[in-house]
Image (cartoon, helix red, strand yellow):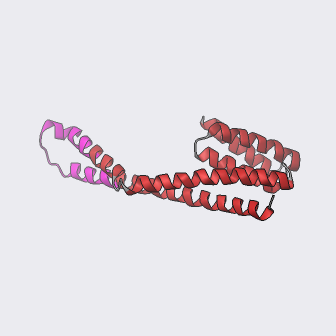
Amino acid sequence: INPEEIEARFRLAVHLDRQATSSLTELRKSKASAAARAFAEGSAKKCSLPGGSEEEKNGSTFRGEAQGKIDTANTEGEGETPFLESAALRMLDEAEELYGSAKAGRSVLYGDTHLDTLACMQRLAELQERRGKIEDAVGNFRLLIEKFDEELGREHPSTLEACMQAAMILREE
């Protein structure tokens, strides 16, 4: 086992994880922003209506128009957004694989309770949680808590943080 290769895998996983997460966050923000703009345009249009049919007065026409604008905004740039989103998801797949590989390599090189191995395990669990792989994430957090407890003690901040992360995931379920 080559230690430089293991560390390179870990660094690449961190880079891919950060890049993909940032890209997905920006895509979601731009979708939400476009939907908000469409809704605001519809609200302004409703406010400028002096009267009209009974349907227009009670706002049902407006709601239909606003929903149409939101739907349009959500699919705006449809050719580019799915491509960027799928590219970011592929990067997360690769990051997850690299974290797993680096964790296995560090485990062999340094042992299961070495802090570098545990850091890798924590990043893997966090990524799994963000991707919705709850069972895998909780399993890794439980193992991480055991290892932190064994190596650092029950009251150590790293142990407590791993406990808190696991609890937050379970609470949301």
Seen in the picture, residue 10 relative to 49 is either above or below; the reply is below
Q: Does residue 95 lie above or below 133 as drawn?
A: below
In the rendered image, residue 96, in percent from the top left (x then y), is placed at 64, 50
Q: Quadrant of residue 54?
A: top left
Image x and y of residue 102, in percent: 74, 55
| Percent position of residue 29, x then y | 45, 55
Q: Position of residue 83 (x, y in %)?
A: 43, 55
Q: Is residue 111 visible?
A: yes
Q: Quadrant where the C terminus lies?
A: top right
Identified at 83% across, 50% down, the residue is 156
Is residue 41 highlighted in magenta? yes
Magenta stretch prevailing secondary structure: helix
Q: Residue furthest top?
A: 173
Q: Is residue 61 left or right of residue 100?
A: left
Q: Is residue 54 above or below residue 160?
A: above
Magenta segment: 37-66
- Which is more toward the observer, 9 or 63? 9
Image position of 95 (left or right of 50): right
- Can you see residue 167? no
Image mark count: 0
Quadrant including the N terminus: bottom right
* Residue at the image position 64 percent from the left and 40 percent from the top: 169
- Along the horizontal axis of the image, is 50 left or right of 64? left
Quick one: which residue is furthest to the front in this view? 1
Residue closest to the eye, 61 or 118: 118
Q: What residue is at 82 percent from the left and 51 percent from the top?
A: 107
- The image quadrant that residue 170 belongs to is top right
Query: Most extreme residue toward the left, as rendered?
Result: 52
The magenta stretch spans residue 50: yes
Q: Nearer the viewer, residue 63 or 80?
A: 80
